[in-house]
Every structure is written in structure tokens, then in C-alpha cells.
Image: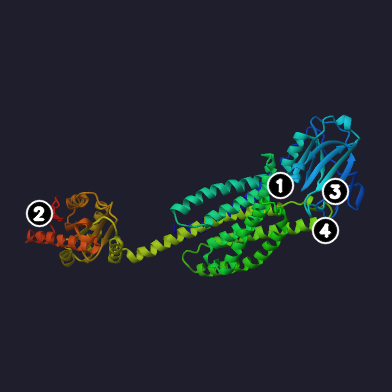
């Protein structure tokens, strides 16, 4: 079966895989996998009193409130009654954004967070506050007050839900809600590290292709942002400030990794405009990091700037990519390597899905923040998470298809080269290939020149069909005797050439002896033909400058000297002569006496 036919049959498995994996992950992230609670757990939704500047609401639901943009120095106070249910290891859990937190029960401070960050001028990370309630029965019905001191401009416009229950079950509840981003982000990070290891090896030893390295960076930044945005790193370590920085840095680095990958994998996109874009995207996370570390401007301030840049770059890049893909498709469609679906089409599919999903989440985030009740506290990146997964899977499939295209291209190239450089009768390399090899060979080598005896008499008396059989048989025996040679070729009607690279001492003599033994074995049971040959060899060290042409001339001269000896001993004989068994020290095969 031809390679092209094989590929047409099997490549359909990959799109199915691309559909099945997201479906499995979505099902895994559904409520079907949720563990029920043992103890009472509730969301304190209603009955809140909320104050923020001139804004005031009583008996309100947090989910329905939009308190307006909170600015640095603002104070938000929300209060409600403590629940009467008693649970072991009782705890109040809520999430805050860029705020110092103080929790009171009837004016008694029971919890604080963030003062050390604020006092030192550092950026307060997002934080899940777990407020222990040591004696739930004692606090039942008392007033729970949460004070938020805002530390950044435009910090939030909505308030996160407040939960009450057993601490272990609250943590489990949070992780179960984040199960899908946890597994997708974990998959992306593992995939990134494996790909980075593989790409580093391939870059050093198999060509300087950077596209695989940038693919690993895409997977890493997407996975890191996914896990950091969903606060999942905080369950692994207490270094919240670092994970908060990682969230913004990975978000700011995603455009650079994507554009760098596109340019490295599509050289036609390597124009001045894209070079400017890649420079901007490379400098953006670096400059924001320097400003953040130096305490000049906190890194979170630049999110709206990134949103604008990302949309503008999408408008600029996407038409170029689509145009390039269409051009490549038209070039490949009529080529013998075309397998029905190109790697670029898979890449465009994944990139388009990721861009669409990201734009949806950007729009959703800004609508929630500025227009709807609840604010960005209820925002998520579920669309971007699924889009990122599909994009990473498409990158994987892209390289699979790219590998198929490369294999098919190499196959076709070798096939066409075989037609151009293979002798159709014997299957050996033809004269053109031998001359090409002689022009390029370097280092230490040896040349064996061989002339098969009695071809013309066989053609004249037994016919050209027998002459062709004689050549084919001799060529097959040569392939066996010179199996370790770098080149076995037919340079003329009955003339052959063998090249041996980095030859061991006496290797030519050994190979010629093997040829003689195989010819003798053939002649012992053949009735019509009797194969024999004259051989001459020379090593590159025997010629000053090691020029391949000079080495060949020396080997050829020795072959003709040996041929003359053969002819002088064959007068009156026809086809029944056999070559001698011991090569001469001068590089020839002695004739039978």
C-alpha cells in the first residue's frame, strides 16, 4: 500500500481524538463526580447590609449587588447574622480581591488578612479567606461583619459569595468546583514540560527549529494562567504573592508565545510588521515585571492594555495566517504529497477556537465588571480554558500532521531521486549518482573499480535477454559481497564502482575475496552463465590530496592491469573462466593460471 493511501485511511482518527478528549474532561468536571457533604454547608446569600461610600443596601443578596468601581482607599463593609447550625471545625469562607480584610463578630475582631502587604506597599493577592469559628453555638445569631479596605484602583465592583460549613468540606467544595480547570491546567503543564524536554533535544541534535520550543511555552503559559486564575496553586503553597504575579506574567506572555510560534513555523510570516509585534509582545511582560518588582506600578494595572493589544493583534495576524494557509493549500493540493488535510488547517482551527473563546471571556469579564450585578467576582475563564485545551491539542495534532507531511515529502523525494539515480536494470546507483558521490565524498575512503567479464560475448551469442540476466545476477551478488559499502553503483555497460568510507586495513581485499567466493558458488550450479570479474582498488591515503577522482583513476588502472592478465590467460576459452581467489597487494585480482 502506498504511503499516501495509508495516510488517507488513518488520519481521521486524530480529529475524533480531538473531540473525545474535551468531552471526557467536561463530563469529568460535571456534578456527576461531586462528593456529597457530610455536615451542614450553606451559602450566606441573603440578608446582607452593604455600605460602600454613598452606596448602601439592606437585606440584600450579594449576587445581585453591583457596588460600583472600588478605588484605592475605599472601605466596603458588609454584615449579616451568623447561622445557628453547629458543625465541627466550623468556618466562614469567602474570596477577596486586592483588599485588606478584617472580620468581626459583634465588634470583636476574629480574623485579619493583608495588613503586612499593604504596609510594605506590595500588591495584595487574591485570597480565599478561611475564618475559623471556634464556638459556633456561642456566635449563633450574632452579627458577622466583614470590612474590606481597597488597596488598588478599579479593584472590584461585586462581592464574592460567603460560605459557612466544615472547613474540610468547604475546601473540597472549592476544589470540586475547580476540577475541570485543575485537570486541564495540570495536563497543559505536564505537556509543556515534556515538550520542552523533547524540543531542547531536537533543537540541539536535529536542526535548529524553534517552533517546538514556543509550543511548549504556549502550553506552559496557558496552564499556569489557568491554575493561577482559579487560585489552585494556593492549595499547594502559601506563596500567594508569587502565584498572583505568575497569573499576570503568564497572561501577558501568551501573545508573545503564540506569535513567536507562528513566525517560527511559517517563515512567510517573518516580515517587518510581525517582527515589530513580536518585539512588543516580548517587551510587554518584561517591562511590566520590572515596574512591578521595583514598586513603581503594580502588574495588575495593565490588564485592560493587554485586552486592547490582543484584539488589535488578532485583527492584524489572523488575515495573514489565513492567507498563508490558503496559499500553501493551493500549492499542495495538486502535489503528490497532499494527504487531504494539511497541518496548517488543524493549526488554524485550534487558534480560531482559542481566539473566539478568549474574546468571549474578555467581553464577559468587562460586561460583568462594569454593567451587571455581582461584578467580576462571578467571572470565570471557562471558555478560555476549553479553548486553550483545544488549542494545545490542535498543536499536538499539528505536529502529527506536520510529521506525516514531512515523511510523505521525504518518501516522494527519495522515490524521485531513486528514479533519477537508480539503474533500472540492476537496482544499483547509476553513473550520475556515482559522479555526485565522488564530487562530495570527504575523509578517509576507498574505491573499488570492477569490470564484469564476457558481457559482449554473451550478448552476441546468447542474446541480450541473457546478458541482462547476467548483469542482474552479478549486481545481486555485489550487493551481498559489499553490504557494508557506502555506495554500490553501475557506471557503464559492464563497469561497476564500490566506495567504502573509513575503511579498515585490508577491507577491500576481504570484500573482493567474498565476491570471488560468491561468484564461484553461483558458477558451480549455473549451466549457461559463468560469472567473473576484474577488480582494482585504491585507498585515499595512497593519493596526494585524497582527491576522489585521482583515487578512482588509480583503482581503475589497477583493474585494467588485472583485466589484461585475465585476458592473457583466457585465450581459447569462452564464458567458463573464474576469477582468482587472492587479491594482489597492488589492488587487483589475479587471473587463474
The picture quadrant where one finds residue 541 is bottom left
Q: Earlier in the sequence, mark 1 or mark 4?
A: 1
- N-term-proximal mark, 2 vs 3: 3
Which of pointers 4 and 3 indicates the residue nearer the eye? 3
- Disc sitting over residue 230 in the figure: 1
Between 430 and 153, the one nearer to me in the picture: 153
Give the residue pinned by disc 3: 75
Cα separation between marks 4 and 2: 104 Å
Which residue position holds label 2?
592
Q: Residue 149 at what x, y percent from top left?
A: 82, 47
The answer to whether the residues at label 4 and label 2 have Cβ atoms under 8 Å apart is no
- The alpha-carbon separation of the residues under discs 1 and 4 comes to 23 Å
Dot 2 crowding, Cα within 10 Å, few <14, some 14–19, many 20+: few
**Judging from the image, what secondary structure is the residue with disc 3 in?**
strand
543 vs 124, nearest the viewer: 124
Q: Secondary structure at mark 2?
A: loop
Amino acid at each position: 500500500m502506498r504511503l499516501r493511501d495509508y495516510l488517507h485511511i488513518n488520519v481521521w482518527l486524530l480529529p475524533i481524538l480531538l473531540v473525545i478528549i474535551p468531552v471526557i474532561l467536561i463530563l469529568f468536571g460535571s456534578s456527576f463526580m461531586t462528593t456529597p457533604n457530610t455536615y451542614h454547608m450553606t451559602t450566606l446569600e441573603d440578608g446582607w447590609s452593604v455600605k460602600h461610600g454613598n452606596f448602601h443596601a439592606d437585606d440584600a443578596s450579594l449576587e445581585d449587588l453591583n457596588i460600583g468601581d472600588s478605588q484605592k482607599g475605599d472601605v466596603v463593609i458588609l454584615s449579616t447574622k451568623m447561622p445557628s447550625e453547629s458543625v465541627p471545625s466550623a468556618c466562614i469562607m469567602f474570596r477577596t480581591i486586592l483588599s485588606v480584610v478584617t472580620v468581626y463578630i459583634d465588634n470583636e475582631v476574629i480574623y485579619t488578612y493583608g495588613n503586612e502587604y499593604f504596609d510594605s506597599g506590595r500588591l495584595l493577592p487574591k485570597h480565599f479567606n478561611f475564618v475559623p469559628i471556634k464556638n459556633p453555638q456561642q456566635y449563633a445569631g450574632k452579627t458577622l461583619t466583614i470590612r474590606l479596605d481597597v488597596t488598588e484602583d478599579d479593584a472590584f465592583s461585586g462581592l464574592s459569595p460567603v460560605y459557612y460549613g466544615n472547613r474540610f468540606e468547604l475546601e473540597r467544595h472549592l476544589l470540586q468546583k475547580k476540577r475541570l480547570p485543575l485537570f486541564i491546567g495540570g495536563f497543559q503543564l505536564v505537556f509543556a514540560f515534556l515538550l520542552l524536554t523533547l524540543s531542547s533535544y531536537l533543537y540541539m541534535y536535529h536542526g535548529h527549529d524553534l517552533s517546538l520550543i514556543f509550543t511548549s511555552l504556549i502550553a506552559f503559559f496557558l496552564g499556569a494562567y489557568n491554575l493561577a486564575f482559579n487560585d489552585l496553586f494556593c492549595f499547594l503553597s502559601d506563596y500567594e504573592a508569587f502565584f498572583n504575579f505568575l497569573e499576570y506574567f503568564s497572561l501577558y506572555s501568551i501573545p508573545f508565545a503564540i506569535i513567536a510560534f507562528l513566525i517560527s513555523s511559517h517563515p512567510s510570516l517573518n516580515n517587518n510588521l510581525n517582527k515589530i509585534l513580536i518585539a512588543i509582545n516580548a517587551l510587554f511582560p518584561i517591562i511590566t515585571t520590572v515596574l512591578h518588582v521595583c514598586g513603581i506600578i503594580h502588574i495588575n494595572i495593565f490588564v485592560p492594555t493587554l485586552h486592547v493589544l490582543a484584539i488589535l493583534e488578532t485583527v492584524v495576524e489572523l488575515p495573514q495566517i489565513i492567507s498563508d494557509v490558503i496559499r500553501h493549500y493551493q500549492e499542495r493540493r495538486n502535489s503528490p504529497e497532499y494527504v487531504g488535510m494539511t497541518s496548517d488547517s488543524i493549526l488554524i482551527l485550534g487558534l480560531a477556537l482559542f481566539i473566539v473563546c478568549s474574546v468571549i471571556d474578555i467581553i464577559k469579564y468587562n460586561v460583568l465588571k462594569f454593567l451587571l450585578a455581582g461584578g467580576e467576582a462571578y467571572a470565570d475563564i471557562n471558555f478560555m480554558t476549553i479553548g486553550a485545551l483545544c488549542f494545545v491539542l490542535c498543536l499536538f495534532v499539528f505536529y502529527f500532521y506536520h510529521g506525516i507531511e514531512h515523511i510523505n515529502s521525504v518518501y516522494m523525494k527519495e522515490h524521485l531521486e531513486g528514479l533519477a539515480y537508480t539503474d533500472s536494470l540492476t537496482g544499483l546507483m547509476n553513473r550520475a549518482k556515482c559522479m555526485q558521490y565522488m564530487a562530495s565524498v570527504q575523509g578517509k575512503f576507498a574505491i573499488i573499480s570492477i569490470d564484469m567479464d564476457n558481457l559482449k560475448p554473451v550478448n552476441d551469442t546468447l542474446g541480450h535477454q541473457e546478458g541482462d540476466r547476467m548483469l542482474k545476477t552479478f549486481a545481486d551478488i555485489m550487493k551481498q559481497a559489499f553490504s557494508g559499502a557506502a555506495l554500490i553503483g553501475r557506471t557503464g555497460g559492464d563497469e561497476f564502482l564500490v566506495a567504502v568510507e573509513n575503511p579498515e586495513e585490508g577491507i577491500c581485499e576481504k570484500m573482493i575475496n567474498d565476491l570471488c567466493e560468491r561468484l564461484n558458488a553461483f558458477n558451480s550450479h549455473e549451466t549457461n552463465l559463468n560469472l567473473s570479474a576484474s577488480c582494482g582498488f585504491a585507498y585515499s591515503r595512497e593519493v596526494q590530496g585524497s582527491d576522489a577522482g585521482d583515487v578512482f583513476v588509480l583503482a581503475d588502472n589497477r583493474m585494467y592491469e588485472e583485466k589484461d592478465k585475465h585476458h592473457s590467460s583466457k585465450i581459447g576459452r569462452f564464458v567458463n573462466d573464474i576469477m582468482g581467489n587472492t587479491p594482489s597487494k597492488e589492488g587487483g585480482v589475479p587471473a587463474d593460471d
